[in-house]
Image (cartoon, rainbow, N blue to C red):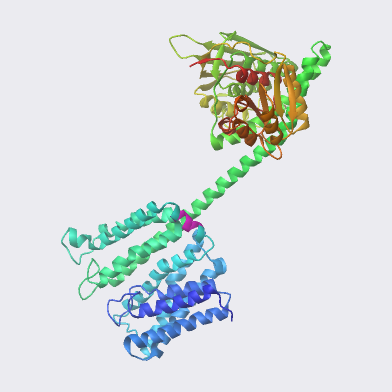
Amino acid sequence: MQLTRNDVIWAAAIAASWVLASFDLLSPRMAPDNVALVWFPNAVLAVAMLRRIHRRDLVALFCGTALVAAGVAGWLRTGESALGWSVLAIGNCIEAGLLAWAASRVGGAQFTFDRPRAAVVWMTAALTAPLGSMIFAFIAARAGFGPVVFANFPESAFNWMLGDAAAHFTLGALLVSATDGERAQRWARARARPALAGVVLAAVLSSSVFAFVGPEFWNGESGVVHPGYLALVAPALMWAAFVYGPSGAAACSLLALAPGAALTVAGIGPFAQGDRPLVLDLQVMCVAMAGATLLVGVLSATLRAARDRAQDADRAKTLFLSRIGHELRTPLNGVIGAADLLAHDLEDAPAAQQDRLDLVRSSARTLAAVVEDLVEFAAMHREGVSVRPVPFEARRPFDDALAIFAPRAQWNGVALRLEARGLENAWIVSDPARLRQILFALAANAVEATTKGEIIIEATLDAKAEAPASLHVVVRDTGPGIPPEKQADIFAPFRQTETDANRPSPGLGLGLAVAKETTEALGGTITVESAPGEGAAFSFSIPVGVAAAPAAGKAGAGNAHALLAEDNPTSRIVLSAMLTSLGFDVMSVETGVEALAAASRNDFELIVMDIQMPVMDGEEATQRIRALDGPRGRTPIVVVTAHALSGDDRRFIANGANEVVAKPIDLRQLAEAVSRVVTQPEANA
């Protein structure tokens, strides 16, 4: 037989528990020959047998250790034959074996309180297994072999079973938790907040002591049971169970039981009733209290584990969306960017060619909008909507919406026009990307719903001196309208209003949900007014600041130099052409290391930095460029990335970027960002 260090520890613990219990140091008794209030050796033996349930030789060793320890300790304590004590230990081995077997049927040798069913099986077996040891001890006592006298039978029989059950509910459950596979994590969680652990233990101990001595010292009454005082233990135990799970529940139940048992044996407390102490009542209370606490602890741990799994799944979902968004955004950036450049080069091309090119651009942006809605919706529900106010030309987002959605509306035979009031030559302070997001969602919804008539975008900038400025926008369409019963859910995610059974609505049903979340993040409100057959009007208002128009910037001066760091060949070609059209001489590199080297050796007016690059990513490269001495460490950096989840832009800005532009990028969007960092207009709140 090969013994491990843990096997030796288990055998030593079994022997020590029997010796200490035999001398009433571990399991107190009301009388020398009476049944113990709580019998802990069986709890130690049961958990040892459970952990080695598949090793019969070790189970036999543990039982043999218990028999020898019981015989020797009993002989030393009473001077009587060791045989009687060893016979008594045989019944206890039967009890421990039954409990270990029942638990192993649920979780094997690695049984743990990982679900409520495991706790119920443990408690049921802990209540019924002592019946076997009690019957064996009773028969042995009647045959003259057992040292235990079952006085006041059958009450003493119940004392035997409840005393063993209380030990299994407390010390047994604690040993199960202390020897399972998650003990290190629980111990680390307790050590992480030592002050809380100390407060919980102090609350349990003090409430237990006060529950037993309170009536005597507070009311001056002795020997009177006050349920109200005893109930004081429950809140502290429930607190421990919720915070620390089954291990904390078992440990604190044991801590609460110790003062009560000690005080009762000493003749103090409500259960010490002179010559007839209420031992059975005390045991019933202890078993009920420990069982309820253990079950609450298991339920708490189960809920915590379910919460952790849900959070892990949410993180995995967000990471998946980030990765898939990057893989979709990067080629879309090439398609949209190349189409924009081609449109710029073919301004004098025949109308038919321009229409086809507009169709390509519109379709690519439609796909980009679907990807953006999906990624943004998932991110905003995990981290919220990030808002980064910057000065920008007030009319620019509306012109972008017209450029994108007017060809699609014309394809449906619908006119799309803008009625702007107060936007000409006005600069405002808000988040242009978020404003575009709202506009695009409402415009896309109107275009898809309208097959005849017109769509009007009404935009009004209210910039009165006596009140904070605000931007009011209404998107009206002449579509079939929205029934009143469906208007309440129109902004719910994954909801679509089918207006034509033969023409299902495209998209994911996220656009309006994202628009509502974004509007509220900007501090505004969004509403809808509609009636069947009368079209729909979506309105939103957001507060804005007022900014001064910028002076002429350096971009386009003919001698400006830009550094482009982008590993994707398609994106590199497109971005380089865009920067060239803005008047920059472009140096292109493919890694963050090359970008850092170029920025440290050359003077640039602008650095355009991708985030995901080999060797060194864009974030680290940005941080290292900011650490350079002199003007080169202060060069404006525009981050372009397909990783544009909510909250990412804040991190990029914190790492040193001046602007963040999400892919896919169009020429006008890039030009706006460049104009802000090369020459910043001065904002007025």
Q: Quadrant of residue 346?
A: top right
Q: Quadrant of residue 238?
A: bottom left
Is residue 377 shown to the viewer in this render?
A: yes
Image: 313 above or below 345? below
Residue sitting at the far left: 220
Q: Position of residue 373 (x, y in %)?
A: 64, 30
Image: 420 above or below 258? above
Q: Which residue lies at the image location 56% right of the left edge and 81% below the top edge? A: 57
Q: Position of residue 15 (x, y in %)?
A: 43, 79
Quadrant, the N terminus: bottom right
Depth check, front residue: 491 or 183: 183
Question: Is 28 situated left or right of 623 in this image?
Answer: left
Q: Position of residue 509 (x, y in %)?
A: 63, 30
Q: Main secondary structure of the magenta part?
A: helix
Question: Is 649 situated left or right of 585 in this image?
Answer: left
Is residue 101 shown to the viewer in this render?
A: no
Q: Which residue lies at the image location 45% right of the left edge and 60% below the top edge? A: 246
> Over which residues does the magenta segment extend?
185-190
Q: Quadrant of residue 446?
A: top right
Depth check, front residue: 559 or 167: 559
Task: Tell me, yes or no, whether the highlighted magenta stretch contains residue 184.
Answer: no
